[in-house]
Amino acid sequence: MMSQKRPEGCMVPRPMKIESVTDETYNVRTFRLRPTDGNGVEYHPGQFNMLYVFGVGEVPVTASSDPYQDDYLDHTIRAVGSVTNVMYKLKKEDFIDGVIDIVTASDFMDLTEGAQIVFI
Ligand SMILES: Cc1cc2nc3c(=O)[nH]c(=O)nc-3n(C[C@H](O)[C@H](O)[C@H](O)COP(=O)(O)OP(=O)(O)OC[C@H]3O[C@@H](n4cnc5c(N)ncnc54)[C@H](O)[C@@H]3O)c2cc1C
């Protein structure tokens, strides 16, 4: 697949295809997502994405895969409400309509290296 250059700025939704679905418990599933644009994924431990289901809504979900690999992304989702109940029913080969990278605590730590921080 030819890779496409991603537009600057992290708020552009990025479609991903579901490569596999693993049942964890009766209402928790892990979805392995692969970007459809041919580019890799880059994230830090603890980073979350906004996952968007077209016409339903978006929810923050933490990455549950190993950040040292860069060609897929796992998200482990518990079905609790309107968006996660729809996501829970997605199947292999379906698409998560949007994955939006968000600056997170680990990025914040990078940005503030050397500074004194008070957590409240
Ligand atoms: C930084 C971050 C990371 C997260 N990571 C993960 C993750 O990795 N995996 C994961 O599964 N979740 C994660 N979450 C939680 C997830 O984002 C929330 O569960 C999400 O809001 C669910 O959205 P929803 O539309 O499915 O549920 P909603 O419809 O928003 O419902 C959320 C909760 O409110 C209750 N509720 C809804 N409507 C009502 C009502 N009218 N009256 C009373 N209660 C109601 C629901 O029963 C449910 O318990 C994370 C959240 C944050 C902030």
Image: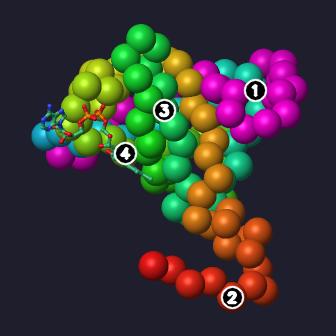
Instruction: Read off the residue under disc 4.
Output: 76
Nearest to viewer (mark 4 / mark 2): 2
Which SS type dominates the magenta stretch?
loop
Give the image location of residue 120, x and y in percent. Answer: 45, 79
Residue 51, label in figure: 3
Considering only order in the chain, which callout, 2 or 3, is on the residue closer to the N terminus? 3
Considering only order in the chain, which callout, 1 or 4, is on the residue closer to the N terminus? 1
Instruction: Read off the residue under disc 2.
Output: 116
Q: Is residue 52 visible?
A: yes
Nearest to viewer (mark 2 / mark 1): 2
Q: Does dot 1 land on a helix, a strand or a loop?
A: loop
Going by the numbered disc 1, the residue's amino acid type is: Gly
Residue 107 vs 114, above or below: the answer is above
Give the image location of residue 12, x and y in percent. Answer: 70, 27
Q: Is residue 92 visible?
A: no
Going by the numbered disc 2, the residue's amino acid type is: Gln
Give the image location of residue 5, x and y in percent. Answer: 87, 26
Q: CA distance from mark 2 to mark 1?
A: 40 Å
Magenta segment boundaries in residue numbering: 1-25
Instruction: Read off the residue under disc 1.
Output: 38
Q: Does dot 3 land on a helix, a strand or a loop?
A: strand
- The tally of labels here is 4
